[in-house]
Image: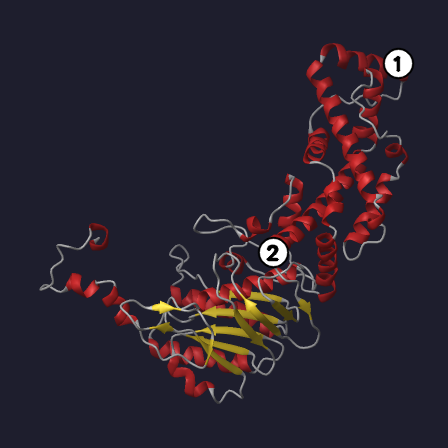
Amino acid sequence: MLPNPISSDILGVDSHTAKDLEIFESDTGDASLFDFCNRTRSVGGAVVLRRRMQNPWASGERIEFTQQAIRYITERRALFNQMPSVYAVEGTQNYLQEILPNLDFRNRLEFVLGAFQVWANQDSHYFSIVRGAQATCRLIQALRAFVTQPSLKKPPGELGPLLQRLRAHLSRPNFRLIPDYDVGAWGTWKMLKLDQILRVKEKDALNRLLAINYELEALVSMADATCEHNFSIPEICTGQMQVEAEGLYHPYLANPVANPVALNQQHRILFLTGPNMAGKTTYLRAFATALYLAHLGMGVPAQTFRFVPVQWLFSSISLTDDLRRGVSYFRAEALRVKAVAEAVARGERVLALMDEPFKGTNVKDAFEASLAILERFSRRDNCLFMFSSHLIELSDDLQRLHNQVDCRYFEAVETGERLLFDYRLRSGISDQRLGMRVLREEGIFDLLDPNSDTTSVPMQTAL
C-alpha cells in the first residue's frame, strides 16, 4: 500500500490507483510500469527508482527540477557512461555489508599481529577484503573521473546538488589518498591498512557515495526510458488546474491510436460514453498513466502535454467486492467515491477518474447517484474529473450543469459481419446499444436455441 502524501510536495496515489495503473505489479503477470521504466544497473539504483515512483512530486518546482536533469542527461548521455561499473558498485556494497574481521587497532603491534593472523589463518576473509577494497577503489576512481568532466561543472536541476555533494565527499583526505591505478598488486600490510581506512574510518562516507550514485542511476534510468519510448517532456503550467494533451496514447500498446485531452475550469468533467470494447477504459488508463509520469518529472506518451500539478490522483477502474470484510460491490464503489470526496472536501487539488461507477446497483439508483455526484463535482473549483458511463439518459440533465461537462464518446463501426473499432474520440454522447449484437456474434443464441444445430461448433467455443 502506498503512503499518503507526507507533504504538499508529494502527489497522493493510493493503493487502488497504484493497482489500476499497474505501477508495481500487474494482475496478468506482465511487466509493471516500474519494469517499463527501470533501466538501472544495480540493486540500489532500482531501490531508489522505486522510492521515486512511490512518491511522485506534486510541486511544479520539484517536477521541473527533475525535468531539467532528465533533459540534460538525454542531451549528453555519453557523459553518464563514465559512471562506475556495476562491478564496482555492487562490489563496494557487498564489501561494506559483509561480515569480515576489522583490524581497528590503535596499537601498531596489535595491528601487525592481527594482520598476520588474517593473512595466515583466514585466507577466504583476506581475499574478500582484497576484492572488496579493489572494488571500492574502482568506485572512487570512477566517480572522481566522472565528476571532473568539464561538461558536468554546473549541470541544471537535480544534478547540480547531487554532484556538489559528490565532490564534497570525494575531497575527504582519506579518499584523496586512493591512487588512480589498480591497487591489486599492493602487499598484505598495505592492503589491510587500506581496508582499515575504507571499512572502518570511511564506511559512512562510502555509504553516502553509494547513495548519491544510486540517485544518479535512477535519474539516468528515467531519462533512458523517456528517450527509448520516445516520450515528450510535459509543460508545467501555473494557476487553476488544467490538463491538455495532443496525441495521447497508452504506452503498453503496440499500435496505439492517439487522442486528445482537454480538462480545465470551463470543462471540469469529461463525460465519456460508448459501447464496451470501444476504448473508454484504455483512454482513462492512458491519461492517468501519462499524468502520473508527468508528476515524476519524466516524459509522457503524448505529442504534447500541458498540466498544472495536482495533489491527489484517484482512479476507480478495477473495483471488486470484499467477502471477508462484508463489503458488497456497490459499497466498494461508494467507499471509492467517498475517498475522492474527502480529498475534495479538504480543498486539495484532485483529479479523479471513474470508470462506469455504480454498476453494483439498479439502473434507477445508478442514474440518480451518477447525476448527484456529477452535479457536486461540477461545482468544485480547482478539481478535475473523468467519468465514463453507459447511462446515456444523463445527457439531458448534463446540459444544465453550467457547461462544466464536456461530453465525448467512442463508437463501433457496425458494417460487416463483425464489429470494428477505430478508437477515435468524438464529441457528443454515444447512443449505440450493442449488447444484443455482441451476443449474436458470439453465437450464444444459437447455442441456447433448441432448434439450432450445434454439432459443428468447435469444442472450445461450446465450452
Q: Amino acid at mark 2?
A: Pro
Q: Is residue 30 left or right of residue 107?
A: left
Q: Residue at position x 73%, y 46% from top? A: 78
Find the residue positioned furthest to the top.
120
- Residue 202 placement: quadrant: top right
Cα gap from disc 1 to disc 2, whole angstroms: 53 Å
- Residue 356 placement: quadrant: bottom left
Q: Is residue 299 above or below residue 239?
A: above
Q: Nearer the viewer, residue 258 or 142?
A: 258
Please report whichever mark, 1 or 2, sits nearer to the chain's N-terminal start: 2
- Whether residue 11 is visible to the viewer of this picture, yes or no, is no
Residue 301 drawn at (x, y percent): 57, 62
Q: Is residue 443 left or right of residue 283?
A: left
Q: Amino acid at mark 1?
A: Leu
Residue that mark 2 sits on: 3
Q: Nearer the viewer, residue 203 or 306?
A: 306
